[in-house]
Image (spheres, coloured by chain):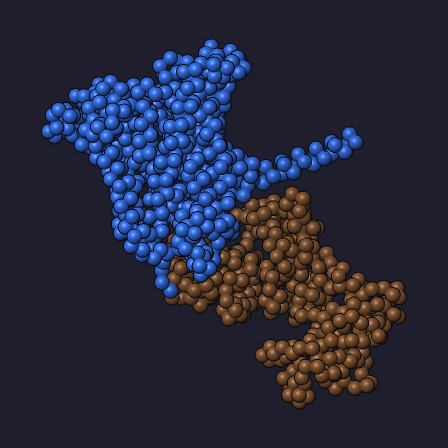
Chain colours: A blue, B brown
Amino acid sequence: MNTATTTTYHNHRSTFRQRLSHLGKEDIIMLIALIGISLSMLVAIIFPLFGMFSKSFQNNSGDWVGLGNFIEYFSSPGLVGSISNSIWVSLLTTVITGLAAFVYAYALTRSCMPGKKIFRALSSIPILAPSLLPAISLVYLLGNQGLIREILMGESVYGPIGIVIGMCFYIFPHILMIMITALSTSDARLYEAAEVLGAGPVRIFFTVTLPGARYGLISAAFVAFTLAITDFGIPKVIGGNFNVLATDIYKQVVGQQNFSIGAVVGMILLIPALVSFAVDRHVRKKQTAQMSARSEPYRPKPHKLRDGLLFAFCTMVALFLLTIIGTAAFSSLVKFWPYEMSLTLQHYDFNANDPNGWAPFFNSLTLSAVTAVVGTLMIFFGAYFVEKTKQFALIRSLVQVMAMVPMAVPGMVLGLAYVFFFNAPGNPLNGIYGTMVILGLSTIAHFYTVSHLTLTTALKQIDGEFEAVSASLKAPFYKTVARVHFPICLPAISDVAIYLFVNSMTTVSAVVFLYAPDTKLASISVLNMDDVGDQAPAAAMAMMIVMTSIAVKTLHVFITKGINARTSAWKNASR
Amino acid sequence: MTGMIKKPQGSDVQPMAYLEINNVTKRFGDFVALDDVSLTVNEGEFVCFLGPSGCGKTTLLRAIAGLDFQSEGRLVHNKKDISHLPPVQRDFGIVFQSYALFPNLTVAQNISYGLSVREMGRDKVEARVRELLETVGLQDSYNKYPTALSGGQQQRIALARALANKPGLLLLDEPLSALDAKVRIKLRHEMKELQRNLGITTIMVTHDQEEALSLADRIVVMNHGIIEQIGSPLEIYRNPASAYVADFIGDMNFLDAEVLTDNQITIGNYTLDVDQQVKHLPKGEKVTVCIRPEDVMVRNVTADTANVLDVEVLDVEFLGSFYRAILSCHGMGGDMEISANFSINLMRDHALSLGDHIKIALPKKRSRVFSGDKQAR
């Protein structure tokens, strides 16, 4: 028995050694790159989360207290009240946004109303702005000195009303995208079959349309709820004394330096995000199975009444979005709302308005540019190794799993986790705390999943035999990546770069815990100026972010056109 | 079956073992994709791995290329042990079913992908590309992108690219499967000619028996990770080594029978002579008799002919150059059916129609007997 074991052990070891010694130069490059990527992901995602996890079981001096923090949290009525506040506000937001986005998406995909392209473009406005912006606009419109505060009939906008309206603005485009996808994947044949069988439009809607889109709708609802419950900017600006979980974290950590309770709230905030993540994964699998290659896409036929009603509805929604963004733009240009409504550019003179001056804006630009370039490259190579290589299956699956984690981690929780991990005494990476590096790292980590999935999808469409072919032609893999994969994926790569850029410009949640005075970002500057009552400069800075995003998006349109012009030579060459 | 060395057709010299595959096994978890496979490929030979999907033929090809390493076993290419070498260090060109042409590179860039301008110089690279384009007959496509070419043309470019480095071994992974029937046959012909002219040792994986029969010097029939038979197309077709091979290659009748004597079997009421293939089997042993439809004798069958059967014409299907008849033989017990080829002349001369009773014979030279009944196959 003993001998047998020894022999097996030796055999095993020798094959392992054999394999190691047979690793080619390329394999070694690949292995080093993979190890580099997985280590970065461990440091940027897993270790911090673990840090927060263990912090929630320790007191502020670092002693193990078991569930003590949780008990303390759940026995303080004020804090527990935040949970129910968060839940009902988020539920209400989910219902309102869900219904509006469904009808809007229905109009875009299933009707013949005019102006679909414009409506689609308008719907993405909120993505370009930090979530603080709708809150600021709402203060101008419905606050104590609001232009149209009468429509609230004496109710105060500071609290749930403001939060819900602001959230609806901020969440709308995200939900709309899911709804559009859900409603576009439908088989026209089903509709024809239903019509032939004599079903009326109402019956078709309930028996074909809704069931076909149900997975998307479920997924959208969970995403909406998660976005609402984890957003920090809106309740911070317009929440007044109405406490929610996201503001609790901020108050406990930044205000009272109570890290343990902060970690507990972080853990609680992870729950809806994790549930939503799990539901989304599950639903995604079902959704793909629905549409087969033989399905015929649905083409709507004109219907005057339906198209008219939908047009009216979409106009209302678009007007709401325009009003919010327009108010921010207008208020940033007005001398002294609402008393002196003449126009001025003085609020944009940040050097005069704020001790930090223009620095935060340029910090944001730097961060966004670096994140867009470095992040995109890193994510591209991560996706490439996961999707296209065969060796080192263990490390690859590790990278793949870690790439999915950020989707389930709200920005605030990630930021807090970074505090625990990087600020811990004895962490060799302590040096990056308070620098731009940590801001970049957290931002890339925060937006990793969507970028990774986009690039993985693009890479999946590339013939899986390219690696084999180039190996047979004695070309190293990196040559093929540079000459073939990268150029083919360029549209997806530029999409990801823009996505990272715009999100780095607008994000508040993670970085709010991580900035230092000299690395303050534009979005945080908005928050701070609003905090000290400089509302007009805050609106001006928010508008600077919006305008930068628009500029970058416009640039993106031209870049895409350029790429298309260059690639059309090989894409759709006629025979 | 292992280590079988056969001369290519019509060759007098003892061929060199160019590629040796020794006891190669490949496991994916519990699944054994290749089970102790051994064979030798000679220099300049065209070998086809033939079998249904999942038989292990592609796995074997990928092991030869180094794209998926074997779990056990040794590969020797041109006297060099390549068992653990990564693909870059092996000497082969490969063509895939999907062509795998780089879409963003021109035809010339694709073909010259593996040619080093630094080592060869720009002029030589260009000359080589032009030469290859001429070889595959696509001189005009130099600056075109792959999408501007038809499927057959793309496959020719893929072939040119695989040949660019003058590899010692050409691997073809179902190269013709994505093409439509006419192009497939044309390209098949061209490929064979090209291979013969260049004399390059070639291994092709295919599930299409017709392709294998027409292209290969030797066919390796595979099933469930093992080699069922290795042999020339004619050998495989005429003398299938197992009922599996008999079934997989061409059309075949399978008739349940029992051993009677050393050279006789019974099917129902009939006793048939066979060609001493049942010597080793005891009397009463269940066997399967195989005969191809084209080998069923339907003309000049007299009372003196051996192995005569009385059959009824159940169905006749027109297949262009001949008719395929389904015949039922009541005397054989059960509802045993036999397919036979009827020539156009026969149909015309005898004015056969459904329900007619005729006599056919099963020539013993053309019948093969395998032990076991056909359910056990």
Instruction: Measuring from the top left, give residue B47's x and y in whole percent.
Output: 62, 62
Instruction: Measuring from the top left, give residue A472's x and y in whole percent.
Output: 51, 51
Query: Could you say which is closer to the camera, residue B357 or residue B3?
Result: B357
When the figure is inspected, residue A43 is found, relative to residue B124, above or below; the finding is: above
Q: Quadrant of the N terminus of chain B?
A: bottom right
**Is residue B110 at all visible to an observer of this figure?**
no
Instruction: Measuring from the top left, give residue A310's x and y in whole percent.
Output: 30, 47
Q: Quadrant of the C terminus of chain B?
A: bottom right
Query: Could you say which is closer to the camera, residue A384 or residue B198?
Result: A384
**Is residue A194 at all visible to an observer of this figure?**
yes
Residue for point 68% across, 54% down: B224
Report the number of discs.
0
Using residue A261 as the reference point, say whether residue B29 is left or right of it. Answer: right
Query: Could you say which is closer to the camera, residue A352 or residue B55?
Result: A352
Residue for point 33% across, 30% down: A164
Give residue A76's quadrant in the image: top left
In the rendered image, the residue lying farthest to the bottom is B349
Residue for point 46% across, 59% down: A197
Instruction: Measuring from the top left, give residue B313's x and y in whole percent.
Output: 70, 80
Using residue B195 as the reference point, say whether residue A13 is left or right of it. Answer: right
Using residue B126 as the reference point, say whether residue B306 is left or right of it. Answer: right
When the figure is inspected, residue A106 is found, relative to residue B296, above or below; the finding is: above
